[in-house]
Amino acid sequence: MAQKYREARWSFSENAQPWLSDDREEFGTARVGRLAKLDPSCTIMSRSNVGNFCHVGAGAVVGEDASLRLGVAIAAGVTIKQGAILRSFCHVGEGATIGEDCLVGRGTKVGAWARVEAGATLGDWVHVEDNAVVKEGTEVPAWTTVHRTLTC
């Protein structure tokens, strides 16, 4: 029932349950927490960390050294780039992109097709609406709503 990790892609044996890993395991150099739900078509790159109770949707890509903490939900087609950190209970909507070395605070919601560019920092409980853009290096304070484009 163990899942196999090959060439930064999840593949499953005949008897595996593709949506459930019941114990923290290591696949290559990526770490996946207990009860994390991973779609078979998602890509988890090396040295990534997917925490307990996370959900990674169809076609999503989690880049090298990225970290998804407790209870993070990633919808279909999302790209999390290298070194990004998503703190507990974040939600990233369909097709959104989180850039390199971004920090996304607890409980933050990034809407569908939104883009958070490299080096941006989102505080706790921020809401980035659908199709919004947070420009490179921008710091967004806690409890803020980003409607369209936010720059430094």
Image (cartoon, helix red, strand yellow):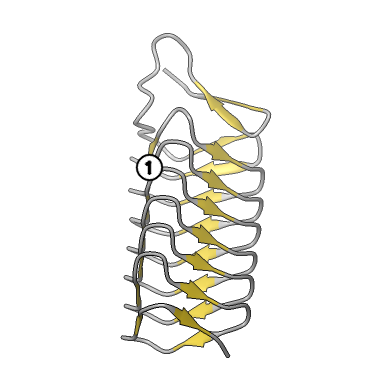
For residue 54, side relative to residue 121 (left or right): left
- Residue 144 horizontal side relative to residue 27, left or right: left
Residue 99 x, y percent position in the rendering: 60, 64
Where is residue 47 shown, x and y percent of the image?
Answer: 65, 48
Asked whether 76 or 27 is in front, the reply is 76
Name the one closer to the observer, 23 or 12. 12
Q: Determine which quarter of the picture holds residue 6.
A: top right
Quadrant in which residue 90 is drawn = bottom left
Callout 1 secondary element: loop
Amino acid type, residue under disc 1 in the picture: Arg
Q: Depth check: 73 or 130 in front?
A: 130
Image point (32%, 78%), residue name: 125
User: 118 or 85, which is in the foreground?
Assistant: 118
Residue at the image position 50 percent from the left and 65 percent from the top: 115
Q: Residue furthest top?
A: 14
The residue depicted at 42 percent of the width and 89 percent of the height is 141
Counting from the top left corner in percent of width and height, residue 121 is at 53, 79
Question: Quadrant of the image for the N terminus?
Answer: top left
Whole-percent x, y for residue 118 in the image = 63, 70
Q: Which residue is mark 1?
A: 34
Image quarter of the C terminus: bottom right
- Left or right: residue 108 versus residue 7 is left
In this view, 122 is above or below 141: above
Q: How many marks?
A: 1
